[in-house]
Amino acid sequence: MALRFYNTLTKSIQEFHPITEGKVLMYVCGPTVYNLIHIGNARPMIVFDTARRYMTYKGYDVNYVSNFTDVDDKIINRAIEEGVSSEVISQRYIAETKKDMAAMNVLPATTHPLATQEIPEMISLIQDLENKGYAYNVNGTVYFRTRKDTQYGKLSHKNLDELRSGFRDLKVTGEDQKEDPLDFVLWKPMKPGEPYWESPWGKGRPGWHTECCVMSRKYLHSTTIDIHAGGEDLIFPHHENEIAQVECSTGKEFAHYWLHNAFLNINNEKMSKSLGNFLTVRQIGEKYDLQVLRFFMLSAHYRRVLNFSEESMEAAKASLGRIRTAVRTLNDRMAHAETEELTDAERSKLGVDAAGNRISFTVETDPETGDKILSDDMRLFRWQFEQAMDDDLNTADAEAAIFNLVKFANIVVTEESSKAFAAAVKDEIMSLCDILGLIVDVQEQDLTADIEAKIAERQAARKAKDFARADAIRDELLQMGIVLKDTRDGVRWERK
């Protein structure tokens, strides 16, 4: 199956064909850096990092650009509160964001441009739009004429009248001077104490929607790019307004594929500070390995609303633990194997001949049910994984394929297996998990710390007479291959 994506622009799943064969130009809108990133920010980071990893696995050379918005009202307000410059705030939280990204195993972008470094190019774009009649200046504020753009609304699939009706009750500063309520700001004049840049319209700064237009094309070195992505909250107005500016300026299509991830809820409610359910990635990291958060984020299709809860995170933790336990067991099998080389039976399970060459592989289908027939050939699981990922990045089914492989490993790799066989099965698990950005071969000291923390939690539960929780922790440890023994000297543990 060829790689396919759901394109918001066409409202359909389409086969992916890049502009240049073998190369992908991909832009993902990054965070506004005025605070620690929250788990809503984390979802597109993880989802589109995984998309990038998979396209790289498929053989594409991916130029992946994701910006930091480092000039914005929220940054300015935070700077005023702390009595420092906006640059101090933005640089602080860029550094903190990069720490959280690394902890989630999100790869650094090919380029992480900063909005403040591209102001001259933004001014040039606005001037071009003004010269072509798409922009107008009112007392130092430059607006975009949405009515002049006959294609406006094509991404959100709403016409101007429908969009305008949603703005009837929306009153913003300066709306009186607009030609149309849907006209949006390209350049805004400075206010006292704010950072500013010189422009033909006076001192000020660009509007948010203009920033990504410039950074995407500049660092992807193309007027038209392959993929533009972000959260579904960006479809309108941000991405709609980006399209309007770029396409009215260049006369060319901005992006061929528009990908958007769905929202993340907290205990079935929209995350917001007013509800008191606003969670940062850093807060989650205080309780969980952030690989658990990554596993959780990929456990549902990216276009489905995902509900975050303690129960869902515990389930993700247990599931990731099963994979890590299988890898740890394979490490143990490798360390204690009595034979080095593959046997004929093991070669058959790996689908290789005596010379190590791959034997032709076909997937059989049950004629009655139409289901794919499982076999002892390990290559089936990679086939399942690829089928899922090719189908609009179905990471939930890709994780299921990994669990099928883990089950295979637990059954077929025994104490009698050769070192080469255990290593080959481990490498397969590691390879598929790496495509999803999951780290599953963790260091022993990390495991020991996790086990000791579980034991301490169990002891606290028993002291509080919460025996159900204590038993549940014992079961969790058993799933990790850890057996507890209550002795006079305290709780001891050993591997099964």
Image (cartoon, helix red, strand yellow):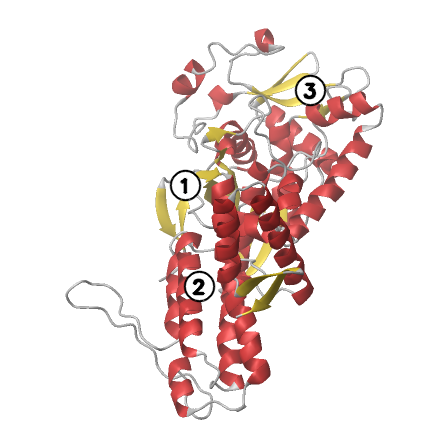
Which residue occupies 40% across, 51% down? 392
Of marks 1 and 2, the one in the foreground:
2
Q: Nearer the viewer, residue 44 or 413?
A: 413
Q: Residues within 10 Å of mark 1 (few under 14, many from 20)?
A: few
Q: Nearer the viewer, residue 389 or 173?
A: 389
Q: Residues within 10 Å of mark 2 (few under 14, many from 20)?
A: many
Contact between labelled residues 2 and 3, with CB atoms less than 8 Å apart: no
Position of residue 487 measured from the top left corner of the image (x, y, whole percent)? 61, 62
Contact between labelled residues 2 and 1, with CB atoms less than 8 Å apart: no
| Extreme residue in the front direction | 488
Position of residue 152 measured from the top left corner of the image (x, y, whole percent)? 45, 27
Which residue occupies 42% across, 86% down? 347
Does residue 84 lie above or below 115 as drawn?
above
Q: Nearer the viewer, residue 58 or 323?
A: 323
Q: CA distance from mark 1 to mark 2?
A: 21 Å
Give whichever of discs 1 and 3 has the lower sequence position: 3
Q: CA distance from mark 3 to mark 2?
A: 51 Å
| Extreme residue in the left direction | 368
The disc labelled 1 sits on which kind of residue? Arg
Give whichever of discs 3 and 2 has the lower sequence position: 3
Position of residue 167 measured from the top left corner of the image (x, y, whole percent)? 47, 14
- Whether residue 22 is visible to the viewer of this picture, yes or no, is no
Q: Which residue is mark 1?
A: 304
Which disc number belongs to residue 188? 3
The disc labelled 3 sits on which kind of residue? Lys
Q: Residues within 10 Å of mark 3 (few under 14, many from 20)?
A: many
Give whichever of discs 1 and 2 has the lower sequence position: 1
Secondary structure beneath dot 2 equals helix
Q: Which residue is mark 2?
A: 402
